[in-house]
Amino acid sequence: MGNYFNTLSLRDKLTQLSKCRFMDSSEFEDGVNALKGKKIVIVGCGAQGLNQGLNMRDSGLDISYALRAQAIAEKRASFVNATNNGFTVGTYEELIPTADLVLNLTPDKQHTSVVKAVMPLMKKGATLSYSHGFNIVEEGTQIREDLTVIMVAPKCPGTEVREEYKRGFGVPTLIAVHEENDPEGKGWAQAKAYAAATGGDRAGVLASSFIAEVKSDLMGEQTILCGLLQTGSILCFDKMIEKGIDAGYASKLIQYGWETVTEGLKYGGITNMMDRLSNPAKIKAFELSEELKDIMRPLFQKHMDDIMEGRFSGGMMADWANDDKDLLGWRAATAETAFEKTPAGNVEISEQEYYDNGVLMVAMVRAGVELAFEAMTDSGIIDASAYYESLHETPLIANTIARRKLYEMNSVISDTAEYGCYLFDHACKPLLADFMKKIDTDVIGKAYAKDNGKAVDNAKLIAVNKALRDHPVEKVGSFLRASMTAMKPIV
Ligand SMILES: NC(=O)C1=CN([C@@H]2O[C@H](COP(=O)(O)OP(=O)(O)OC[C@H]3O[C@@H](n4cnc5c(N)ncnc54)[C@H](OP(=O)(O)O)[C@@H]3O)[C@@H](O)[C@H]2O)C=CC1
Ligand SMILES: CC(=O)[C@](C)(O)C(=O)O
Ligand SMILES: [Mg+2]
Ligand SMILES: [Mg+2]
């Protein structure tokens, strides 16, 4: 086995990267019927496993969990998750042989060993499903030819897959059928039913490919979604402390600020988020984000290139072989940051104040979303996929930071995402050192001066508004958000 993507011709690489068809809601009129009455066994009851299972059971499907023997014997978290929620739990030998659909929702680093253990137990003609393409694309795992292989990948942390479903909404989802494993031609019908069962069809589903999903997912999670929110949290907090802002206030502004300002993003794109600022502050945020884009563009492009060419996967798999030494060390170091160790203060901050006193955070979000979108689309990923993987998912990740800071984000996202987040953070913080030297509390921690004695330059404001509205992420975003009729407010 080896990196499957790297074995393809450039023509085939581009073909696979560009697989991205926005599916009409009418394609989901059959709902979950293709899986009704089928035995669905989930391997792994963690962030995705538990939350997808809860949604699928609520959608009327037969769900049970096959856990490794020691998870049951030791009553590990996965066993507790499954049994506390009333699911049937068994070993691979007990549950896999009768399964019609097996969902592999274990950590990517375990996929090869899990598939090796589970595949021989799967009955002829069953289906194996993933929620990320890593094992097939980056490791080149070969699946028994009588088995169907599909992917249903929520563009969202596991916890929010459940929260959005409970609100009557869902999360954007990429589905795919592995072209080498669809012997009965049932893959797409099953993938659609699975996506409907998780609520994905209420937010938007793209008919994609394993390759398009994995290359975009790795990019989004390392950069704008987790990496930049981590870097921004730490740099903005440290700057406010350096400048004498109350620590409790600074902590709260960051912890809940991302969620608040990106809620505006979720509803109306970057345009709406920026429109929530005063005109002088909007111009300032635009100028800061233009500078941030120039500084960070090479780093975003490097991450995209490393992902496309397999260098990222190679580096991460080397850490897997080294018992996650880097991942565990970086996780411990993050826990020691001042932001993580300072509780949010018992102070009132209004929804508008998060915008007014967080101009730099708004600038970072705009810069990160646009850079990630640009790097993905410049590398062959289609705009709708890049939108889900950058703009739409940012507020969903921000929701996790609002709960329990970076600890929660890095706990809920996959280990793959967490590894990439730290990789980005370690490179981005020094890159922004000179930029941060010029930063003062007028753009982070205090309200930006509404009118510093000068009138707003109308020509500049018009140019700023045009630049924001003309960005391609806004154009594809307005189309995709038009179908999100069930979207509910979170803040
Ligand atoms: N986290 C997320 O939000 C997202 C994840 N994904 C993808 O979903 C998949 C699952 O990720 P995620 O939910 O984060 O995983 P988690 O780390 O949250 O959960 C892992 C689960 O797998 C079990 N497990 C761990 N090691 C093994 C093993 N060797 N054999 C069998 N079971 C094992 C764990 O059980 P135990 O209690 O025994 O440790 C636990 O139940 C990945 O492919 C990921 O890329 C996709 C989108 C988002
Ligand atoms: C939550 C999600 O979509 C990530 C960041 O890609 C992941 O956790 O792998
Ligand atoms: Mg993802
Ligand atoms: Mg991921």
Image: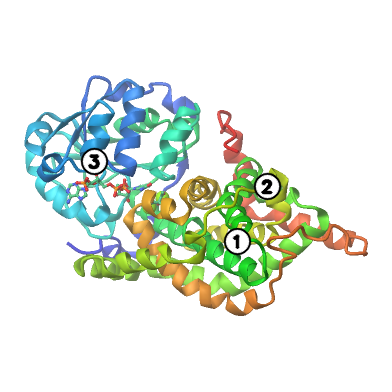
Please name the residue that numbered disc 2 is placed on. Answer: 349
At x 20%, y 43%, the residue is 76
Please name the residue that numbered disc 1 is placed on. Answer: 247
* Residue at the limit of the structure toward the bottom, as seen here: 434
The image position of residue 151, as x and y in percent, is 31, 42
Please name the residue that numbered disc 3 is placed on. Answer: 78
**Label 2 near label 1: C-beta < 8 Å?**
no
Q: CA distance from mark 1 to mark 3?
A: 37 Å
Q: Earlier in the sequence, mark 1 or mark 2?
A: 1
At x 39%, y 45%, the residue is 208
Q: CA distance from mark 3 to mark 2?
A: 37 Å
**Label 3 near label 1: C-beta < 8 Å?**
no
Mark yes or no: residue 185 visible: no
Whether the residue carrying mark 3 lies under 8 Å from ligand 1 is answered with yes
Question: Where's the C terminus, which quadrant?
Answer: top right
- The numbered dot on residue 442 is none
Amino acid type, label 3: Ser
The image position of residue 38, as x and y in percent, is 22, 24
- Comparing 290 with 285, the one in front is 285
Q: Residue 375 vs residue 294: left or right?
A: left
- Of marks 1 and 3, the one in the foreground: 1
10 Å neighbourhood of mark 2: few (<14), some, or many (≥20)? some
Q: Residue 231 vs residue 471: left or right?
A: left
Q: CA distance from mark 1 to mark 2?
A: 14 Å
